[in-house]
Structures are given as C-alpha cells and as structure tokens.
Image (cartoon, rainbow, N blue to C red):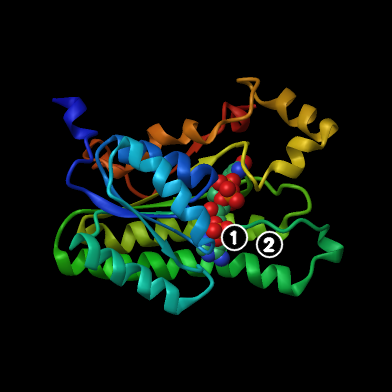
Amino acid sequence: MILDKFNLKGKSGIVTGGGSGIGKGMASGLVQAGAELIISGRNFEKLESAADELRQYGGPVIPVRADMANMGDIKNLVDRTVKEFGKIDFLFNNAGIIRRNPCEDFLEEDWDDVIAVNLKGPFFLAQAVARVMISQQLKGKIINTSSLIAVQGGKRVPAYAASKGGINQVTKSMANDWAQHNILVNAIGPGWVKTDVTAPLIEDKQRNAEITGRIPLGRWADPQDLAGVAVFLASDASDYITGQTIFVDGGWLSI
Ligand code: NAP
C-alpha cells in the first residue's frame, strides 16, 4: 500500500546540522516515520538537547560532533554511523553557513569557510557514505540542502550563491555516477525559513516585509515545513527520482 512506502522503519542515516533549524525539522519528520538517526554538528550541547527533543517521536537519535570543514571528522561520522546501525540507508547533507558582505568587500577567508562547509565537506561526506552504500549493496538515498540562492544571485552572498549553485550541479554529477549502484541523489531547496541563519533578516523590519510580500503563500516557512519532503526523498516512495532539486519555497520561484 502506498503509505507503507513512506515508512522509514528499519532505515538509518545521518542528518548533518540536525541540531537546529531545517535539519532538526527534517529530522523530526524522519524519526516520526520510524528512522534511526545520527544528528551531527559542532556544538555537542545543542545536539544533545535536540536529540532529547527528537526522541519523543521515536529513535534512536544519537548526537555526534563533526565539523564539516574537517575531513577527519567526516570520516569519523561515517565510521560511527556504521558502528551504531550496521548500515547507512540515507544521508541528509544539510549543515551550512552564510557570510554576508557585498562582492566588492567579500573576504577570502569567508569565501574559503563557506565553500568548505557548504560544498567541499558535503561532497566528500557523500562520497564516504556512497562507498559504504556501494559495499553494502543496498539502495541508498543522499539528499543535499540547496537554496533559492542556487538559482538566484541573492544579495551580498557571493560565496553562498557559489556553494549552493555548486551543490545543485554536484547533486546531478553524483546522481549520474551512482545510479548504477541504486544510490539516488537529490536536493531540497528551501525558500525563506525561520532559523538562526535568517534571524538578521527577520529582525530587519523593512527587509522582512519585502521578503514576506513577495512570497505567494504570504509567510515564511517553519522548519517543520521541510519534514514531509525529507521523508519522501528518504523513503521508497521516491525510488524513481534522482538528480532533482525540489524547491519548498511557498511559490517564490514561480513569480
Ligand atoms: P541553522 O539552524 O544555523 O543550521 C545550520 C546547521 O549547520 C547548524 O545546526 C550548525 O550546527 C551546522 N553547522 C554549521 N557549520 C557547521 C560545520 N562547520 N560543521 C558541522 N555543522 C555545521 O540554519 P538553517 O537555516 O537551518 O540551515 C540549514 C541549511 O539550510 C543550510 O545548508 C542553509 O544554507 C540551508 N538553507 C536555509 C534557508 C533558510 O531560509 N533558513 C534557506 C535555504 C537553505 P553547529 O553550530 O552545531 O555546527
């Protein structure tokens, strides 16, 4: 039956940046659908408190400290997941940062940080996870967090735009190379979501009004608005979708 295909019971995987915002919203959907999760990030206390909250829906939910800019941490994250669950069915490559500065003032250090966390780290984490999936000879799902700024330029965010445009392209490269192994790779492109990353924009009354006024659904997303698509893309219900970016943007890109 169709609803059974959305069930994640017996499936296990990783949500990077699962301690807050969109990652936590997606994780709550995955746990409610029956999945076992590792949630990762740099701030272990934040992860522990998110894991406590998520366990009310099921679990296990295990917090693991891992910096996406550190290749050793990425390897440990994958090893730990295999150790805990014996296999990896899905990866949500969601952790990300943003640095705001006009193009004429943008700093090399900010460029390198954003590209490391949003593009290089996710690629090599996906590679390490795909190697496990290939060796276990099971179907796998890899889901990257993209953005509207993958297809629009944004304002004062050149490195972020490059990283998210890049992640959309890498999503397609990985989808092509790994289809033969039944590893399906897609991206979720959130619109304007109320999280720590967007707090400065939400507090800026004028910018907030500009943004809200341009969203056809007339409101910012809550992280929970991303839970449904996360469950869908991790589940058997999406077994013929690969190489896509699904935008969850309240209609923003349609105007
Ligand atoms: P958030 O709450 O700040 O989440 C970002 C997460 O990434 C945090 O949990 C953070 O945990 C983790 N993180 C940051 N740097 C890291 C690093 N070096 N290594 C490991 N983890 C790291 O903001 P969010 O809005 O939910 O962002 C999640 C994703 O959605 C990002 O990829 C962002 O670009 C994307 N996105 C957001 C929006 C939006 O409107 N909010 C729109 C489109 C796309 P620690 O601090 O513990 O490391």
Q: Is residue 56 left or right of residue 160?
A: left
Q: CA distance from mark 2 to mark 1?
A: 6 Å
How would you rate the neighbour count of disc 1 (Cα within 10 Å): few for under 14, some for 14-19, many for 20 or more?
Answer: many
Quarter of image, res 129: bottom left
- Give the SS element for disc 2: helix
- Residue at x 46% of width, y 61% of height: 170
* Residue bearing the label numbered 1: 163
User: What is the three-letter code of the residue carrying label 1?
Assistant: Ser
Q: Is residue 11 left or right of residue 52?
A: left
* Residue bearing the label numbered 2: 159
In the rendered image, is residue 34 in sight?
Answer: yes
Quarter of image, res 55: top left
Do the CB atoms of the residues marked 2 and 1 lie less than 8 Å apart? Answer: yes
In the displayed structure, would residue 88 be above or below residue 52?
below
Count of number-bearing discs = 2
User: What is the three-letter code of the residue carrying label 2?
Assistant: Ala
Q: Which mark is residue 210?
A: none
Q: Nearer the viewer, residue 50 or 144?
A: 50
Quarter of image, res 5: top left
- Residue at x 19% of width, y 41% of height: 9
- Furthest toward the bottom, the residue is 72
Quick one: quadrant of the N terminus?
Answer: top left
Q: Is residue 185 left or right of residue 82?
A: right
- Give the SS element for disc 1: helix
Q: Where's residue 179, x and y in %?
A: 26, 57
How would you rate the neighbour count of disc 2 (Cα within 10 Å): few for under 14, some for 14-19, many for 20 or more?
Answer: many
Q: Is mark 2 within 8 Å of ligand 1?
A: no
Q: Where's residue 120, x and y in %?
A: 51, 69
Q: Where's residue 19, x and y in %?
A: 49, 51
Q: Nearer the viewer, residue 82 or 137?
A: 82
